[in-house]
Image: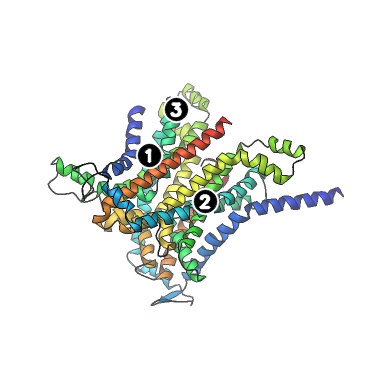
Amino acid sequence: MHFGYMVFYYAFTFAPLIILVIFSFNDSARVGLPFKAFTLKWYAEVLSDPTILSAIANSLLVGAVVTLLSTPGGTAAAFVLVRHQSFVGRKAFNTLVLIPMVIPPVIVGISLLTFFHAIGLELSLVTVILAHTLIALPFSLLVMVARLIGFDRSLEEAAMDLGADELTTFLKVTLPLIFPGLLAAAILAFTISFGEVAVAFFTIGYQPTLPVYIFGQVRLPTRLPVLTAVSALALSFSALLVVASEITRRIREKK
Amino acid sequence: MRDKFLQFFRRKVQLRIFSGLSFSLSWFLLFLIVPTAVIFLYSFWRQEYISIIPQFTIDNYAQFLANPIHIPLFLRSLVISAAVTMGSIGLAYPAAYFLAFRVRKYKIPLLLALMGPFWTSYLLIVYAWKIILGYDGILNSLLLNLRLVEQPADLLLYSPFAVIITLIHIWSPWLVFPLYASLEKMDKSLLEAAMDLGATPTQAFLRVTLPLTWPGLVVAVLFVFIPTVGEFVTPALVGGPQGYMYGNLIENYFHLGFNWPLGSSLAFIMLAVVMVMTLLLLRAVGPDKVMESL
């Protein structure tokens, strides 16, 4: 029985994504059956469409900056949470971490839109970066908490006993040890930002990120084949990132 | 002397704690708490044409009650979210259960594979469902080619059903992880004990396994039900008029309808409802437990 259920469950989970990829190669102006012929022309169209390319560039830029902000920020907080089991406000801080993860994105979106408007900050990729850092931060933090729980502090103590100061210990002992974890947290933060649409939709200016662009174009039937191709590209990119993240985990385990 | 040293040391620890948390804390305060306070304030103001008049009024909240579409839409969103939550748990629980207890080969690759959809942009998943379920979509073209239908069926897309199935698809792989973690941690001798004492497998499941996986289930409710109540992207793509949700209403007041104070009050009402739910759930399990089971 369990075998049948697992087959059903994995088929349900992956079929839509596989279908999306298959039909991105269909030589038809309509995304559907019959599957006429294999073509790469929708991909060629993606590569020659300057609006899609700039949307991709915007997403990469936003994702990169968000990663650079949320990874160190989340890591610093994770160190505190793992190494100081009790301090005033720990519970309140934990709750604060969970809020952005569960709150409906529409609320984050409209409140940031209103807030940016109230302080006179014009909407642009900068406001999307500010918003996405809020969303990615709890995830980076939790990944680092999970990685730091198993951290062997005796290595740090040994370095300190041998005369290294805090900074040297951190750079020469702690950082190399937590590096795979940092990489995993960074990849997750990037992925979250790269795929996020709901909050970006409210905080974006005139330059769309890729998901916001797709969301805006999806009502136009003539655009569907190209959007399917660019979606398949984005999917493969995420799949690559999962594999990369998994490799960093393996590296850590070997050590 | 010793006291002074201790005092200094304590201060230094607090300083270390504070500096470690400072980035996250300031980000959460500045971009989460303050903006929420701002929309709370706006929800008591009113809008005339394109200017917002900072004059206290509870008119927006009165409109929530008076407008005949607001409350039904809110209720519909709650019903859709409940269906999505139950559907995702219903699909993910057996998968997590089998992975924890039955599957022996390829356990880790199977678990890791489920991270795929979780890492995928959720817009892309909605988009995939749109091209599958659409009027001109793959399912309809299949039915037409097989001559099962004469005309493209419009049942599947643009309905609450399409919203529910899409959201279940998005959330259920996500849930396998916390559920698997709590099942895996479970002390299996408890099950043997229950069986020895004459419990049927169903009884053992209901009275031993299910209560022990309670934190995982709370995570499910917290992370699926609550964000889904405010969903607007999925209904916009696959929902149609019948699948239109409360989140679309709020979105509409901020864009086309252009009434920020009213939109803010609607958002705040939803926020209040989900906040009360979250606090009750967190009180039942504790934030530390929830974070552990993530």
- List the residue tagged with mark 1: B90
- Labels 2 & 1 near each other (Cβ < 8 A): no
Residue A226 drawn at (x, y percent):
29, 51
Residue B94 to residue A170: above or below: above
Q: Chain of mark 2?
A: A
Observer able to see residue B281:
yes
* Quadrant location, the C terminus of chain A: top right
Residue A236 to residue A125: above or below: above
Residue B73 image-quadrant placement: bottom left
Image side of residue B76 versus residue A117, left or right: left
What residue appears at the point 48 percent right and 21 percent down from the top-left corner? B196
How much space separates mark 2 and mark 3, taking CA atoms?
37 Å
Where disc 2 sits, the SS reads helix
Q: What amino acid is found at the position of numbered circle 3 in the picture?
A: Phe
Residue B108 drawn at (x, y percent):
45, 31
How much space separates mark 2 and mark 1, taking CA atoms?
34 Å
Crowd class of label 3 (few under 14; some 14 to 19; many from 20; radius 10 Å): few
Q: What amino acid is found at the position of numbered circle 2 in the picture?
A: Thr
Q: Chain of mark 3?
A: B
What residue appears at the point 15 percent right and 42 percent down from the top-left corner? B145
Q: Are marks 2 and 3 on the same chain?
A: no
- List the residue tagged with mark 3: B101
Give the image's coloring scheme. Answer: rainbow
Crowd class of label 2 (few under 14; some 14 to 19; many from 20; radius 10 Å): many
- List the residue tagged with mark 2: A67
How much space separates mark 1 and mark 3, taking CA atoms?
17 Å
